Amino acid sequence: MLIVVVRTLILYIVVIIALRLMGKREIGQLQPFELVVILMISELAAVPSENVGVPLLSGIIPILVLLSASQSLAYISLKSERARDIICGRPSILINRGKISEKELSRNCYNISDLLEELRLNNVPNIADVEFAILENNGQISVFPKAQKRSTIPEDFGIKPPYEGLPLTIIMDGKLKKNYLEQSKKDLDWLKSELEKQQISQIEDVLIASLDSSGKLYVQAKATKKSNSKHSVR
């Protein structure tokens, strides 16, 4: 039993390393050849972990071979546009200037119901509002509404909003993030003072404290401090 556990852990580590080397993209964003590699890696790892009679290297070596092949294809597609079209394919325009392309739907085995579903998922319930809909190589659809149907932005009204940087999570689950506190150019005395204003005496009582670029501090206490559960202070 101990041998099975050790073999499984080794294969698990190998698979994790292989997937990390492939990048950080989610499953829905993978190219077809990358998805095939992941499926094959899972199958190859399962055989030696279930059967102790199969040498461990019989699972590790094929995984490394697949990883090498995947990295090679990724490098080739990065350097050559023609190779990228062959390996990854080309995006398909399903709706072009407000017109549905039946040819592209048929070529991609896409029906109208699938198209309408994807439009709804993109918050476009009315197909008449769509100027372009492009089926990307990863299977997702990019939707571009018609100009008169797009969401308004400040630039449309000549408004230039102030810069908004990333908020800094200073406290998470009762633990102080000192590097973020230093990055915010605040000190511990300031933080404790702000928490005391919200009747929170200890950092350990804070579920999360986040400081945005405008200097606004959002604080939520843990359940033990339910009476002061949510606060925003400046």
Image (cartoon, helix red, strand yellow):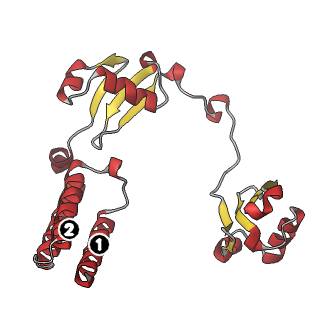
- The residue labelled by disc 2 is 45
Relative to 187, is 112 on the left or the right?
Answer: left
Give the SS element for disc 2. helix
x 66%, y 68%: residue:
173
Nearest the eye: 139 or 151: 139
Q: Can residue 197 be seen in this view?
A: yes
Ranked by sequence position, the earlier of labels 1 and 2 is 1
Pointers 1 and 2 in contact (CB under 8 A)? yes
Where does the image place residue 104, in percent across and percent down from the top left?
22, 25
The CA span between labels 1 and 2 is: 8 Å
Q: Which amino acid does label 1 sit on?
A: Tyr
Give the SS element for disc 1. helix
Relative to 208, is 112 on the left or the right?
Answer: left
Q: What residue type is labelled 2?
A: Ala
- The residue labelled by disc 1 is 12
Nearest the eye: 161 or 131: 131
Where does the image place residue 105, in percent across and percent down from the top left?
24, 24
x 11%, y 74%: residue:
58
Q: Is residue 79 visible?
A: no
Vertical placement of 34 versus 110: above or below? below
